[in-house]
Structure formats: C-alpha cells, structure tokens
Amino acid sequence: MVNGSYACGNSDLLKRDLRDTMGFKGFVMSGWKATHSSMDMVHGLSQEMSVGAPEHFQLAKFSEFGPVRLAEAAGEILTSVYRLGLNREAVSCAQPCTSMKFANARSEAHTALAREAATASLVLLKNTGALPLRAGPKKRLAVVGLPASARRGEASSRCPLPRLEEGQKGKDEHWACQKMTSADYYGGGGSGAVVGVDPLTPAEAIKERAEALGIEVVNYTTRESMDAMSESEVALGVDAVLVFAATTAVESMDRTSLALDDHADRLISRFAELAPTVVCMQTPGAVLTPWRDRVSAIANLFLAGEETAHAWAATLFGDRTPEGKLPIAMPASKEDQILPSKSKMVPYAEGIWTSYRSPQFKWAFPFGHGLSYTTFAYGEPEAFLGGGYEKQRSNDCDAVVCVRMPVSNTGAVAGREVVQAYLQFPRDTGYPMLLRGFQKTGLLQPGTNTEVSLEFTLRDLSLWVLESSGWVPQAQFVILIGSSSKDIRRMLNVTVPTE
C-alpha cells in the first residue's frame, strides 16, 4: 500500500504522477496477483497479471463503469504492441525459446564491458595493509572456501550438496532445487536470472595471476578438501589466507538471515587467529560481519556476473585500485536491521529514516563507504547560483545551485574517487541528511588533480510537505561533501534568495 491504497489501484501514482506529470503513454501491468479489484482499471491499471484466468479483470465486472476506460486500457496495451512492431513481425521462436535463451550472443566488446563493470564495482571495506598482494621470493597464499571454485548454478545456501549417505535421491533433490532457483554466486535466481557461460572461477584466476608473479597458491575450495583440511596446517607457512564467503538470493524465496553460507563466520574467525586473513565476499546485499575487527582486509562484490574472477584477481594483486562504494549500509549486528522474516506481514515503520538516515541503527560499514589503495584530498568548494535559478543567467551550470571543488590524488598509485554530496535541511523541517548528488572522477595519477562538479536542481533542493501534497523548495540548507555518509570532508552553508 502507498498512503493507504494498493499501488496497483492508486490513482495518485498511476494517473496523476505517471500519466499526467510524467507523460507516460504505455500500459501498466500489475505484479502477480497484486490486483485487488476490477476498479483498479479505473484508477489507472491496464492489465491484471494472474496465475490462470484473471480474477478481477473480467468482462462481467467491467460493466459497472462503462466501456470508455476499458477501451483506453486496451489502447494502452495495443500502443506498445504497434510501437514494437509485434503486429507485423512473426515471432521467430515459439516458447520456451530454449535455443535462443542458451545461445552465446557475447562479443569481445561485451566481455570487456562486463569485466570493467565487475572490477569497478568491487568495494574494499577494510584494509590494514594486507592488500594489494605483492610478489616476492617464496611467497605463498592459501585460498579457502567453496565460493572460490563454485560454477554457474552452484550455491549451497539454497541447495546444499547431499551427504554421501543420502544417495541418488539427495542428488536428484539437489539438482531439482538448482533448476528451480537458478541462483548462484554470480547472479540471483528467479524469472530475471541471466543464463551465462560457466565462468572462470576466482580460485582459477587467482592461481593464474599469482603464478605469473612467482607466488605459490594452495587451494582448499572443494567440499572434500575443506572437510579434510586442518586450519592450523593450512595457515602454517603462508603469507595470507584468502577466505571466500558468499550467499545469494532468489525470487519468491526470501533470505532467512543475513549470515554468509556454510558457517563461513566460524571459518573466518578460526583463520583470523592463525594468519593474516583477507575475506572476499560475494553477496546480493547486506550481510553480517561479526569477525571484521580480527581480519586484515575485507572486500565485497555484489553478484558481479561471469567476470567476477577477473575482478578479484585484478584488485587483489593491485592491477586495479578499488573504486566501488557501498550503495547500502552493512549492519553492525543483527539488531541493526529489519529482521528477515517468513511472515507475509513485515512492518517497515521507519519511514524515510532508512539506511544512513537512521539515528537508531549502527553500521559496520556505512552507506557510501569504499576504500582505495591511494588517498584523495578534497579542496575548498565553491557554491554559486546556476542558470536554473530564475534570477541568474549562467552558462557554466544549468542547475539552481552548483558546486565546484578540486580533488587531488595524494597517494602513490592511480585511482578514482566517488565524491558524494548530502544536503542537511533546517532541523524544523524534520528531515534527515539526504544524498542529493555524487560524481566519480576520472583516473587520477599520483600528484594530479581534477575539478568535481556537483549540480542541484530545484527538485534536489525541495522537500515533500504532506500538508501541501507537493515538493516545496527550501531556501536554506547545508551541503555536506564527503567520501561516504560518515566521512564528510567539506561543508557549505547555502541560502537561495527567494526574492
């Protein structure tokens, strides 16, 4: 529900906002079984998605509001049919289109783009100097954890491998589960799951890169090798232990907790007492990290696809400096979150006070956080009114308020920084600090700098005021500029003249 009305029958959302304000000309289809009444069509819904025959969108039920809206809804759907040419082009593949779904349509350019996206999104959460891994005489690494060698379709959280005594039945159930969920440590599962080739595994990529540097790698990344290993023996004589830990998510099967799979917390804690430990996580979202104070480094990839392995190898060995930032906050404990639940009714009563806005929750790693192998200095920012302000004519900025600020690479290696801008409005507005802009720099070589531009539109400078049922521009606010929501480097008090 949105403001008391189900979204699929909310005329404010579907008619006022979507069609009138935004000018949307297509059709609106409900989620599965999300329609609650035939009157939802009157309120802006075009089509009911249901299992089998529609429950509410039946011709007999439409008689109560006449043919006009019915004709409009049909027209909205047909508009998309004609726009896509579906009326004149024969479908080249009858469902389920298996051959097309499993065809390899990749190119070298696509693969390069996937690799760049995966590598750029890796987030370094903690580093006490263990990373990047360096070449050296007699260097030795241990790679531990099932996710390091997982193939496509393998994810133990949803479909744990059967024990030997379970026999063929257990194997059949395992693979039936895999087929149903289609989730793995490279991507989530469900109707939106993307079928890809079997990717190179992180263990394979790390071994290849390490051997090129003369570093020996020992792998404990299969169930058999992990069952047989002794943590103290593995840690003996190695320069670092890379522990791969992961979990995944799938449509229609909510995560039951924010813990990593296969009791990874226990495994990480054991190694943290024995050797320098680097934790490499592959996750669909937030996870708990109760061992974070005892390990040397932590990095996270958010289910980054088939180029996951290359992203790990490039970053761990310093071929690429980490530049990803957290788009969420990692909770400090299980109390610092809305607890996962199997209930069909889960109250989200925090309103706008979510994530970094919450004064209640504590964070292990805050929203916007992400470390680098280099350091950045933020210069003195300058704010001015741009061309979007009706009394100002500026060719430099089309927004209402514009900020320019120099950013310098003060470290020893090249890197990119993501500068974030949060607005703090006067206390009497009742609003928390709000992210209103960010900009990623280009690749900065050591000792060089660039100018970052942050531009704020009238909407950015407005707050939703319930009494007026609309966005109200604010004349006074503070711009907080930082490397994360908890690492604010610069502040600017700004007043926009109202006369």
Image (spheres, rainbow, N blue to C red):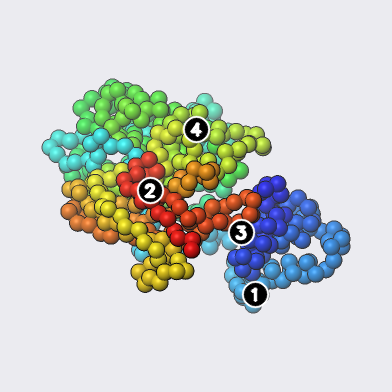
The answer to whether one can see residue 229 in this image is no
Q: Which mark is residue 480?
A: 2
Give the mark toward the camera: 2 or 1. 2
Cα–Cα span, label 1 and label 3: 23 Å
Label 4 sits on residue: 360
Label 3 sits on residue: 96
443, above or below 239, in the image: below
Helix, strand or loop at disc 4? loop
Instruction: Kindly identify the residue that appears in the image at 67 percent across and 48 percent down.
Output: 3
Q: Residues within 10 Å of mark 1 (few under 14, many from 20)?
A: few
Cα–Cα span, label 1 and label 4: 51 Å
Amino acid type of the residue that numbered disc 2 sits on in the rendered structure: Leu
Question: Residue 68, how many percent across, how many down?
Answer: 80, 69
Question: Residue 35, how many percent across, how many down?
Answer: 73, 52
Q: Which mark is residue 109?
A: none
Question: Residue 362, how many percent across, how many down?
Answer: 44, 32
Give the mark toward the camera: 1 or 4. 4
Instruction: Kindly identify the residue that appears in the image at 79 percent across and 57 percent down.
Output: 39
Give the mark toward the camera: 1 or 3. 1
Q: Nearer the viewer, residue 38 or 419?
A: 419
Label 1 sits on residue: 82
Q: Residues within 10 Å of mark 4 (few under 14, many from 20)?
A: few
Q: Is tag 1's residue or tag 4's residue first in the polypeptide sequence?
A: 1
Residue at the front extreme?
499
Q: Residues within 10 Å of mark 2 (few under 14, many from 20)?
A: many
Cα–Cα span, label 4 and label 3: 49 Å
Q: Nearer the viewer, residue 438 or 399?
A: 399
Amino acid type of the residue that numbered disc 4 sits on in the rendered structure: Gln
Helix, strand or loop at disc 2? strand
